[in-house]
Amino acid sequence: MAKKLFVKTYGCQMNVYDSERMLGVMAAEGYEATDRAEEADLILLNTCHIREKAAEKVYSELGRLKPLKEARPDLKIGVAGCVAQAEGEEILRRQPAVDFAVGPQAYHRLPALVAKGGVDTEFPLEDKFLKMPAAPRRRAPTAFLTVQEGCDKFCAFCVVPYTRGAEVSRPAARLLGEARALAEQGVREITLLGQNVNAYHGEGPEGGDWSLARLLRELAGIEGIERLRYTTSHPNDMSDDLIAAHGELEKLMPYLHLPVQSGSDRVLKAMNRRHRADDYLRLIERIRAARPDIALSGDFIVGFPGETEAEFADTLALAEAVGYGSAFTFKYSSRPGTPAAGAGEQVPEAVKDERLARLNAVIWRDQKAFQQSMVGRRLPVLVEKAGRMEGQMVGKSPWLHAVHFQAAPETAGQVVEVDVVESGPNSLSGRLAA
């Protein structure tokens, strides 16, 4: 009888991808996935360290899992991901129910760690992806593909360079091979992942480095792949050839996540973002000139140490100028070990709350207007799965809207035309076109 593995994933899409690869690693060791922790022989929490109180959420979950361990001492519990990388030894000291902790660069050594326990947070010289089996066969028409890991930008608020390491790009030939295998499994949309994905500079099949634009052009030529996306990007790495690709590649969807964090030049400098607000706005103009229908998404942090009301007003002005289709907004929270963690002039929580509410009002207004602009249009929708209502299917528009409509289950995996009739808070409703 196969052993059972339960994986709970926190955080970003790269963690989702990593969880799938760890499932592949452990499948080779005789484990099969389960969605019930109670029946698992191995429980793995794949953690994220970006958000506020991330570690405490992990400890709370471990507290809930502790009775399972007490009832079944042979149950193995492990913590993976960025919290494990940052606090591996502390996790094992603080929560004895945990058998092991493994960092993001050591997943290919997971079977040995399951067997012996302990902590593995080394940054290995070998390519972990070469050592890891493929993820289990896809059942969905969409998939993630990690092309780049780590970051060299060292933004003052961010732990990624310390938990994921320096920027590393995977060889293009391996990525093309993985993409072809995904297409053969029925995948129709691939999202390329990286902590700083547009800094991709992987080795080409015949030598020399490929840019992300070159990789996208080659992926667009794979039969069966109908849509391409990528995330997350840095403004300083939006190269001319990548901007041009948005205008020239039909399969590259008209949606771009391009974090800015602040509209104040002083705050951007304190964040070590290495660009000004005007640089970002001029970049948006160039991207929209190449692809006029593109929707922009972004990240914002309010209440960075020392942020004044006037500097926050600059952020509001930038958000107004861009008109985002969606955005992720956060209050600044100190991450231990980052340069901003020890900065003075901390902004009071009440001020952060008030500023976040004002920024969200602008973002939500523009997001609602963008969604409403889809009503009355006929959109190509990639059908992903059954909806909550009987006879309902759910898919994604080119702009990443969730779209609900009545259709046969056999439409899953197809791109169909849908006439949008209504815009809801977070999705669109429509009718399958004749």
Image (cartoon, helix red, strand yellow):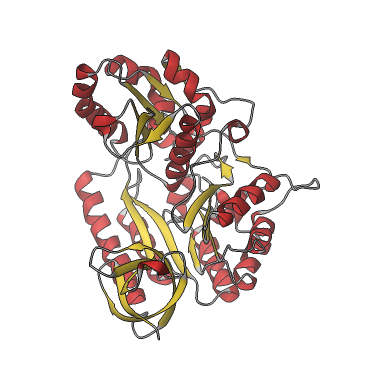
Q: Is residue 43 left or right of residue 425?
A: right
Q: Residue at x 48, y 26 (%)?
A: 29
**Residue at coordinates 19% horizontally, 48% vertically from top-left?**
350
- Percent from the top left, x then y, of residue 357? 23, 59
Residue 263 seen from this side: no
* Residue at figure coordinates x 27%, y 70% from the top left: 391
Task: Give coordinates of residue 384: x percent, y percent.
Answer: 40, 62
Q: Is residue 89 above or below residue 43?
A: above
Quadrant where the C terminus sits is bottom left
**x 63%, y 63%: residue:** 223
Q: Residue furthest front?
A: 1
Taking the image as shown, residue 204 lies to the left or right of residue 41, namely right
The answer to whether residue 5 is above or below residue 427 is: above
Q: Quadrant of the N terminus?
A: top left
Residue 299 higher or lower than 130, as above or below:
below
Which residue is the extreme one toward the right? 206
Residue 105 in sight here? yes
Q: Is residue 322 left or right of residue 431?
A: right
Task: Please state which of residues 137 and 358 is positioned toward the viewer in this rendering.
Answer: 137
**Tally of numbered discs:** 0
- Residue 342 location, x and y as percent? 37, 31
Q: Quadrant of residue 334 in the image?
A: top left
Q: Nearer the viewer, residue 390 or 1?
A: 1
